């Protein structure tokens, strides 16, 4: 199924001209499943806070592919032999690593497709594409699943220092204008090496890695978990949940045929694999599909659905409070009671507007794909034992924050 098209040159605002290999890489980019990523926002509803954050998963995937090319060249320059098949396999794996995302990326993770993660959906896509391309993705799938014998290849795709993270930090920093996320990608890649089949960083690159970790932490709290973004994305989840509730109880709601199928069914991984039509339905779901539904739903007779849909479209975001401890249930009940009286709605309806939950973030995991530092004497140590700036307890600590969303007009102290 290879096309005879020439290699592409893509002009990227971050890296400049990116050359895309002719053959299967080019064909995969041109495939309708991959082109769908042009219609999936990289940062969900973050554009409501950062107007420039309009970039897509398509751009991120191309950027990650570019960094993978640079990393492979760097490793080869250091004397490591990587076969043509391995290079192609790992490039396919990084190119497709996000192909399974739902509309608005992480915002609607497990909301439309409840029981399957985007990583599992990615694997479903890869298996389907492998059939279409006559087994050309078999090695990529092994690498993606970490079942290939050369483990460093998987680390380039999925680890705490992979090409995915390097690109999204650089790219998200650029498009949001949050300069704290701007990392030295070229410097980090130049410090990559392999030791005992593990991806390592040369000792002199440790300070670049420290900056990378701090940048990631800052981007999480300033962008990915920004309080207004958190409120908006949870509003969108509430809207989808309410729409499903209305469909299940009255059917008086507009739904596109593709969204309707997922509202009425909870498909398993195996069902996706066996029934190609399910994946076809999912592949037609994107950000535009959800926006189209919101425009219909503002006219729905249901107060909750129409009101929340209008708020999202008008950027009338629910107010949000964030603190280190759980919110007092009596305070939440008081807010809900006040709204129930003013709007003549029931308790269940008020919960769509006034709700509390928790978000978590950690600086570094010492148990999952640790970042290894290669010292001049040949010894390898985990970053947490090598850094002058961090200690183990700080690195491993998970920070939990609790939030409460509510309409300001119903606030009662």
Image (tube, rainbow, N blue to C red):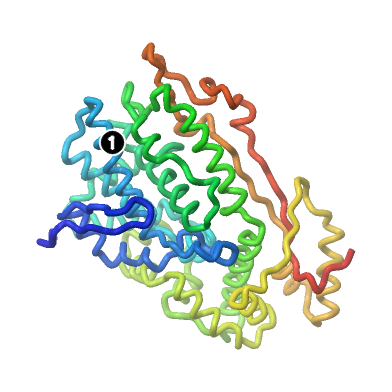
Q: Residue at x 63, y 46 (%)?
A: 360
Q: How many marks?
A: 1
Q: Nearer the viewer, residue 77 or 91?
A: 77
Looking at the image, residue 373 sits to the left or right of residue 250; the answer is left
Q: Residue at x 59, y 68 (%)?
A: 236
Q: Residue furthest right?
A: 413
Looking at the image, residue 40 sits to the left or right of residue 30; the answer is right
Label 1 SS: loop
Image quadrant where one finds the C terminus: bottom right
> Where does the image place residue 167, in percent across and percent down from the top left?
41, 48
> Where does the image place residue 134, in percent across and percent down from the top left?
16, 55
> Where does the image place residue 209, in percent across and percent down from the top left?
47, 32
Q: Nearer the viewer, residue 383 or 116?
A: 383
Looking at the image, residue 408 sits to the left or right of residue 51; the answer is right
For the question of whether residue 96 can be seen, the reply is no
Q: Nearer the viewer, residue 203 or 350?
A: 203
Image quadrant where one finds the N terminus: bottom left
Q: Residue at x 56, y 53 (%)?
A: 224
Crowding around mark 1 (Cα neighbors within 10 Å: few <14, some 14 to 19, many 20+) is: some
Q: Nearer the viewer, residue 206 or 265?
A: 206
269 relative to 384, above or below: below
Residue carrying label 1: 148
Q: Residue at x 46, y 37 (%)?
A: 160
Looking at the image, residue 274 sits to the left or right of residue 333; the answer is left
| Residue 201 figure quarter | top left
> Where does the image place residue 302, in percent across and percent down from the top left?
66, 83
| Residue 202 figure quarter | top left
For the question of whether residue 349 can be seen, the reply is yes
């Amino acid at each position: 199924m290879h096309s005879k098209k020439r290699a592409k040159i893509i002009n990227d605002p971050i890296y400049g001209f990116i050359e895309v290999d002719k053959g299967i890489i080019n064909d995969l980019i041109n495939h309708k499943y991959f082109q769908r990523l042009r219609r999936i926002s990289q940062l969900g509803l973050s554009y409501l806070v950062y107007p420039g954050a309009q970039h897509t998963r398509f751009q991120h995937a191309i950027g990650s592919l570019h960094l993978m090319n640079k990393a492979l060249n760097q490793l080869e320059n250091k004397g490591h032999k990587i076969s043509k098949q391995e290079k192609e396999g790992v490039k396919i794996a990084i190119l497709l690593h996000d192909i399974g995302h739902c509309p608005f990326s992480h915002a609607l993770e497990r909301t439309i497709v409840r029981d399957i993660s985007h990583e599992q959906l990615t694997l479903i896509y890869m298996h389907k594409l492998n059939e279409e391309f006559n087994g050309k993705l078999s090695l990529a799938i092994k690498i993606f699943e970490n079942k290939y014998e050369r483990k460093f290849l998987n680390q380039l795709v999925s680890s705490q220092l992979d090409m995915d993270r390097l690109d999204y930090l650089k790219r998200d920093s650029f498009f949001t204008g949050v300069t704290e996320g701007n990392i030295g990608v070229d410097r980090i890649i130049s410090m990559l090496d392999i030791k005992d089949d593990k991806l390592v960083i040369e000792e002199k690159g440790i300070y670049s890695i420290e900056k990378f970790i701090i940048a990631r932490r800052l981007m999480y709290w300033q962008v990915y978990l920004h309080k207004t973004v958190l409120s908006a994305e949870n509003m969108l989840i509430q809207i989808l949940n309410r729409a499903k509730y209305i469909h299940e109880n009255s059917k008086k709601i507009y739904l596109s045929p593709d969204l309707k199928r997922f509202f009425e069914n909870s498909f398993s991984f195996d069902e996706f694999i066996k029934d190609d039509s399910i994946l076809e339905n999912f592949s037609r779901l994107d950000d535009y599909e959800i926006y189209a539904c919101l425009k219909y739903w503002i006219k729905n007779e249901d107060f909750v659905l129409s009101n929340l849909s209008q708020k999202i479209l008008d950027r009338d975001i629910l107010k949000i409070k964030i603190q280190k401890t759980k919110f007092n249930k009596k305070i939440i009940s008081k807010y809900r009671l006040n709204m129930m009286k003013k709007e003549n709605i029931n308790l269940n309806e008020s919960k769509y507007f006034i709700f509390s939950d928790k978000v978590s973030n950690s600086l570094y995991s010492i148990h999952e794909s640790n970042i290894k530092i290669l010292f001049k004497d040949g010894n390898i140590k985990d970053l947490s034992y090598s850094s002058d700036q961090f200690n183990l307890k700080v690195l491993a600590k998970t920070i939990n924050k609790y939030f409460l969303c509510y309409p300001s007009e119903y606030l009662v102290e």
